[in-house]
Image: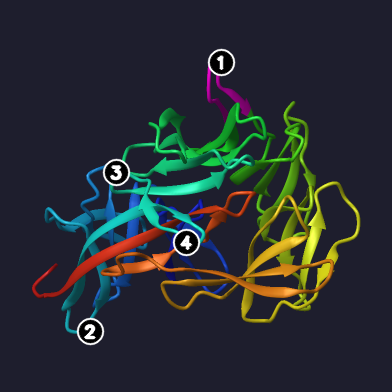
Amino acid sequence: MAFVEYPLPDDDRGSVVMVDLQGHTRTLTQEWEGIQGLAWSADGSEVWFTASAGQDWNRHVYGVTRSGKLRQVLEVPAPLYLEDIAPDGRVLLQRQDRSWEVELGQVGGETRELSWLSMMAPSSVSRDGRYVTITDYGVESYRVYLTPLDGTPSTLLGKGIAAGISPDNKWVAAILPSDTNKIQLLPTGIGQMKTVGAPSFRYSDADWSSDGSRLIVRASKSDDSIRWWLQNLDGAEPQPITPKGVDGLFLSVDHADYVCARGSEGIMKLYPVEGGEPKSISGVAADEQIIGGSNNSSVVYLSRLQTGISFDISRLNIASGRRQPFITVVPNYPAGIAGVGRPRFTSDEKYYVYSQTRSLSALYVASGLK
C-alpha cells in the first residue's frame, strides 16, 4: 500500500511511503514542499502523485517505482491534484485555485479579513486578546507573523510555523518544518531567538503555560505515537501530560491549564497539565467536539463534528452543567469555501479568529500519459 506521510498537522509537506502486509515501511521519495493526490499507475509498476518541489505552488505529476526511482510524468503551469487512474490509463486530474484566508469576527458584529497573502493560517490568540499569530505557508520554510487585532501592521518574527504566544506577549513559539526536533522561541521585540528541545523528540505544536514558565508541547518520542508533554524552557526531558496514544487540544479553563481529549471509553476528559487524575466532562455528545475554553470561567466551547462550512458553537459550564447557544461562524462569502477552521476566541468573548480554505477547481481527463 502506498500513501503520503505528513510530519506536521495542517501542512501538505510530505513524502511518498510504501508499506507491505508485514508492516515494513519504505520512504520512496524526498520530502516535497507540497504533495497532494496519489494513485497506482495502470500497470501497477509505479506510484503516481502530484507534488511541488519549490514555492511556486505548481504541482506536477510524478511517478516513483517501488525501488524509489523517480521521474516526472507531466509538467504544467498550474497546481494539479491527482484524483485517480483508470485501468485503461486515463488520468483524472483536478486543477486547483486555492487560497487560505484568516478572518476576524466580532461576536454579534461584522467579519473582516486579516490575511494579506494567499496561503495564511492563524495559530493562537494572545491571552489579552490583542494579537494573533499567523503563518505564511507561501514561502520556503514559511514565515511567522504577529498580527494586532486593532488593524495596525503585522510584524514578521522569523521562519517556521507559528504556535503559541507567551502570556506577556514577549515570545512566540514556532516550529521549523525542516527541523521538528526543536522549538524556536521568537522575540516579539528586542532580543535573540532561543531554541528548546530534547533528544529523540519530534514536535508538532507548542503553547505556553498560563504562568509563562513552561511550554505545553504536542510531540512524539522516538517511534511512539503523538501525545502532550510539559516542557521546561531549560531543555530538560519533557514530562507526559496525556497517556500514550492520547492526543487532544490544549486549553485553559478557569485559570487552569489542561489537555482535553476523548478517552478510550468515549468520555471527554480534561488532563491537568500540573498532573493528577483527569476530570470527566459530562454533557458532551459523541458527535460533538470541544474546540476551546474560557480562561476566565468554567466554560468550554462545543461544536458538532464539522460536516459543512459553518460552526454552530455552544457554551458549556463544566461546573454547573448549564449549556447555552453561543454563536454560529459562517463565511461572509461562501463561494468556493472548502472548509472552515476551528475558531479561537479572545478571553472577553468579543472577538474570534478562524481560517477558511477557498478552492475553485476544474476536472480534466488526461489520456496518453506514460
Q: Position of residue 105 (x, y in %)?
A: 45, 55
Residue lying at 14% horizontally and 55% vertically, measured from the top left: 75
Q: Height in image: 319 above or below 257?
A: below
Magenta-drawn stretch contains 179: no
Mark toward the start of the polypeptide (3 vs 4): 3
Residue that lies at the very extreme toward the right in this rendered image: 276
Q: Are marks 4 and 2 in contact (CB under 8 Å)?
A: no
Q: CA distance from mark 3 to mark 1?
A: 27 Å
Q: Are marks 4 and 1 in contact (CB under 8 Å)?
A: no
Mark 2 belongs to which amino acid?
Pro
Residue lying at 78% horizontally and 66% vertically, measured from the top left: 269
Mark 2 highlights which residue? Answer: 87
Q: Secondary structure at mark 3?
A: loop
Q: Residues within 10 Å of mark 3 (few under 14, many from 20)?
A: few
Q: CA distance from mark 3 to mark 4?
A: 17 Å
Q: Residues within 10 Å of mark 2 (few under 14, many from 20)?
A: few
**Residue 191: numbered disc:** 1
* The residue stretch that appears in magenta: 185-195
Is residue 50 or residue 88 the one in the foreground?
A: 50
Q: In the figure, is residue 230 to the left or right of 147? A: right
Q: Residues within 10 Å of mark 4 (few under 14, many from 20)?
A: some
Mark 4 belongs to which amino acid?
Gly
Q: CA distance from mark 4 to mark 1?
A: 32 Å
Whether residue 29 can be seen here: no
Mark toward the start of the polypeptide (4 vs 2): 2
Mark 3 highlights which residue? Answer: 117
